[in-house]
Amino acid sequence: MTTGEPTIAVEAERPLLEVAAEAEAAGQYLPVDAAVEATTAAEAAAGTRLGPRALGYGPARRWVVGARTRDGHELGPPEADAGAWAGLAADALETITWRTLAQPEATRTVIGLFLESAGAARALATLAAEPPPSLVAAELCDRGAGHWLVGEVLDAECVLVLRLEGETEAAARAGRAAWQAVERAGGMPRVFEREWGRWRWRATHPTLGARAVVARFEAPNAELPALFDAVRETGALLGESAARAHALLGALYGYLPTGPRLDEALTWLRSAARERDAALEVVLPGMA
């Protein structure tokens, strides 16, 4: 990686989370998140899937300054060079240059603990109606995915994780708004004090590991809680599962163990997707 304010240039096949960590170590802040942990810089730049912080910072392409393809063509920013980027495959890219920011002045994470997804949905509806300007990510997790995300076991069936970044006063106001939204929806709010790398994915799921089958849903935000519950219900069939939604971005990821009843679980999820006007893609282990 080469650095120089306010951009970083990286090899396209590098994992995006690795790039972000190196940028932070160099005093730069890459406001781009991976849709899934294995996402490469090229997949983020050329793809359309959003990472969780796209809620606050927009899609990854917004932060691309330029790129070089493997056959030597220089590309400008996607907004200005739309024709060259249209239909471009990730494996056609050799290097990508990203625009970076200064480190946020303040960061805060508010966690809402709920007994059921309906309560979390009420809190999300409040935040969607009047989004706090410093709210950059909103994640709805079950118990297992919550453990995955924050690194500790949380005593709740549904965990709402709200990430706030920005100027100190604005982040504090947004934190109060997030706390109140959780409390008024019947949840138990708390401030998560420990940082874990500027809202980045943690390591592979603590119990499912790399063997998980991933069910990717794209759906209207209002339908995500019901689909979230459908993924949770497969846990009774399979022995375990995990659900994580980018709650205001229309995306849900279900993680399922392989086994003799996997096809039955997937049939259940396909039915739920049809009922909720959702698109569903199933990704087998090793096929990110």
Image (cartoon, rainbow, N blue to C red):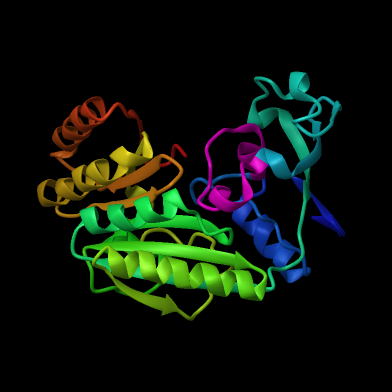
Name which residue lies at 41% across and 39% down.
250
Q: Nearer the viewer, residue 210 or 280?
A: 280
Name which residue lies at 56% across and 45% down.
39
**Quadrant of res 89:** top right
Residue 140: % across, % down: 35, 55
Residue found at the very far bottom of the displayed protein: 193
Name which residue lies at 53% across and 76% down.
195
The answer to whether residue 209 shows anywhere in this view is no
The answer to whether residue 229 shows anywhere in this view is yes
In the shown orientation, is residue 87 left or right of residue 277? right
Residue 209: % across, % down: 36, 56
Task: Please report the bounds of the magenta region as a residue range.
Answer: 41-60
Residue 268: % across, % down: 16, 33
Q: Nearer the viewer, residue 38 or 23?
A: 23
Residue 91's place in the image compared with 233, above or below, is: above
Quarter of the picture holding the N terminus: bottom right
In the shown orientation, is residue 104 left or right of residue 246? right
Q: Can residue 45 be found in the magenta stretch?
A: yes
Residue 219: % across, % down: 36, 34
Name which residue lies at 69% across and 20% down.
86
**Quadrant of res 184:** bottom left
Residue 21's place in the image compared with 252, above or below, is: below
Q: Nearer the viewer, residue 76 or 43?
A: 76
